[in-house]
Image: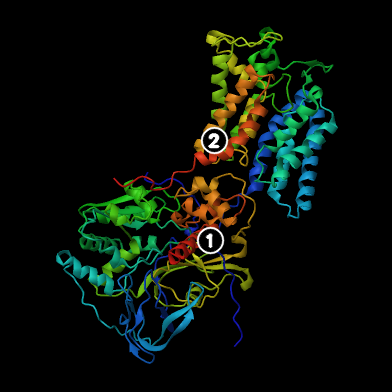
Amino acid sequence: MAEPKLLSVSSSPHVRTREDVGHTMRDVIIALVPALVGSIIFFGTRVAMLTSIACLTALATEIALVLWRGRTVDRGAVKSALVTGILMTFCLSPLVPWWMVIIGAVVGIGLGKHAFGGLGHNVFNPALVGRAFLMSAYMGPMTTWDIPRKVDALTGATPLAHMKAAAYDKLPDLWTLAIGKIGGCIGETSAILLLVGAAYLLIRKVISWHVPAAYLGTLALFVWIFGGTYKPEGGKAVVRFFDGIGPAGLGVIPIHLLAGGAILGACYMATDYVTSPMTRTGMLIFGVGCGLLTGVIRIFGGYPEGASYAILLMNMTVPLIDRATMPRLFGAKALK
Amino acid sequence: MATFRGGIHPAPHKDLTDERALDSAAPPALVRIPLQQHIGAPAKPVVKKGDAVKVGQTIAEPGGFVSVPHHATVSGTVKAIKELPHPSGRNLTAIEIANDGADTPADELEPIRDWPNADPTLLRDRVRDAGIVGLGGAAFPTHVKLSPPDDKPIHTVILNGAECEPYLTCDHRLMLEAPDAILVGAQIVRRCLGAKRIIVAIEDNKPRALDIMRRNARSLDDVEVLGLRNKYPQGSELQLMKAALDVELPKSRLPMEAGVVVQNVGTALAIYEAVIAGRPLVERAVTITGPAIAAPRNLRVRIGTLCTDLIEQAGGIAGDVADEVGRIILGGPMTGLALSTTDVPVMKGTSGILALRRGDLVDYELNACIRCAKCETHCPARLATARIGLAVELDNIERAERLEVLQCIECGCCSYVCPARRPMTHLMRVGKSKVLRERARRKASG
């Protein structure tokens, strides 16, 4: 008797959602489009050129390293490299030379991601690793800012640099801040467009509210409390409580939230699955930590901006946070 | 609306058979009754090759307390008692009976018409003698659940009509077509246990069943019909108790320790028939469905009928090419068992035969975990699923044990949601079996 043809078998469940890592990354890319378009309008087509270079370099680095490590190229990992490319460009000055973008993307993907084992294994956010490297290697070009909508691209200070210097009279009005017609990194300036994208990610359930809310809430509280603090040239910081701008010092809150990289960091970088905690409680702790560190760096530190370093520092604490916030097992309580 | 934390909303696909009333399947030419088709010790055959048997005749007796007898489901001749293909994938001993088509009844059991005044022990023995097991899928011997120790009083019987597995509709049809009998069955269970209350729990995606059960329950004392939010795995015993009574059963405790016994609606119907009509469990409702089935339908099937016969009666495999068929599954798509051959019998716990096309399946791969924690937020047992998966992948069995892998209920939610397409549930199974093997080894070596 001939052996009957057997059907293939597999372990249950036999169905699954069609959503995969590729879809997740596609959603993130879609969410970043409004801010990218805004940035091209504010800073010119140069931004499009820089973003394209960063994405192509990130993609090439990703594929080259995956092949070199003898792994198969995964659709999700490729799209995630694109996200890294866009996000890294978003935290660079629009005036950086094109070759610097290439270096940043290679370092971000290579050192930030594949040195740790590729997608899913990296400790630090790869885009921020790229930025941090460029920041320490090319301080000058990284902190030379373009003022939007000026025919001759003048270099000038960002709103946060004015805050740092307590030059309150030089601050733009809140509306200009919210739209993003201000000096700053490529993708960080338009709070409104970034929030539109973040809302899309929330609706699509790609991110949850925990990290952004904890991050921005803590930052708001911190700058409100210490908002009046300023550093005279070469001197020690003079701490003043609830004494920033406006009634009860509340005026500093919108400026710190709308200017700089807080929203970009809170919604797009601190929410990165790989480098943030897994439980809701862990996310809240992580968000609070990011907010605190951002505030500390901005008000007491040497830089006007602290979002990227705050997130990188908090990335290191994720294994500890995860361990401290394990999910509570079903039936952990005794019967009544 | 009552529910539990975690869980998923898979595409239901119940519309394929929801409107198909239960029909009797054509009498099978032969049946194969496996001795092992329930949790517990396998039954022991009491007939031999060549014996003539009648419908409902005991052909195998219980192999212990946690075991049940099995009965001839057709009348005819015992053709063989030998190892035959079993749905588990192994070859296990089964009694093969050739049907003579006469359906001669054995009439072994007397009807107990006056059940409201019958001795609970008598009723319990009847449930055992009728070979009844949980028909929801687990196939745990029902009389064991009906025999709690004296220090564990039972206050509530939950009748499980959740039917949360996609595609399956046989329990839904039973509730629509035999609501009164099911409720009598539930009251017999209540009498066996000396319980006070009955809660009939049904997911709210079955409004007609809710309505008809409510109407039938109106005249009964302490029978409550409860709508549950439609979410998988609502029909799992632990999640059902949480939703219906807000009780989270601690690990390694039994529902009876919380004063609760859960019975599936199909089981209640089988109990009704065993008590009122003196009919042992020889038949059950089965949904034959799926995109690769030509004419999906619900059938009343003799236990032991081969799946091949039933697929035929549902129009056969849709399309011309057999290669189109991706999987044939006994049960639902989330927890069902994939078959290597359809020449295996329907068992007491078989609620469905599901045929999926190749395109309906998504292959799992051991990709890198991206730590999105979707598996953990959706885990109804609230395990650190992602972490356990990684531990098992690295063969760190001690860590998997510490992370409570044994509390996994294998519902499949983690695999379903994983965007990296990791075979999470399979990793849990591997972890569980390795932990148990390690424990046995430790015990053996003192």
The spot of residue A327 in percent (x, y) is 47, 43
**Placement of the C terminus of chain B among the 4 image quadrants:** bottom left
* Vertical relation: B41 (above or below) B156: below
Q: Quadrant of residue B108?
A: bottom left
**Placement of the N terminus of chain B among the 4 image quadrants:** top left
Q: Determine the residue positioned at 33% across, 57% down.
A: B254
The spot of residue A180 in percent (x, y) is 69, 21
Q: Amino acid at mark 1?
A: Val
In the picture as drawn, the residue positioned furthest to the front comes out as: B446
The residue indicated by pointer 2 is: A283
For label 1, the SS is helix
* Vertical relation: A147 (above or below) A271: above
Same subunit, tags 2 and 1: no
**CA separation in Å, label 2 and label 1:** 30 Å
Res B361 seen here? yes
Q: Amino acid at mark 2?
A: Met
Chain label for disc 2? A
Q: Quadrant of residue B103?
A: bottom left
The spot of residue A306 in percent (x, y) is 66, 24
- Give the left or right position of residue B181, taking residue B324 as reference: left
* Vertical relation: B130 (above or below) A298: below
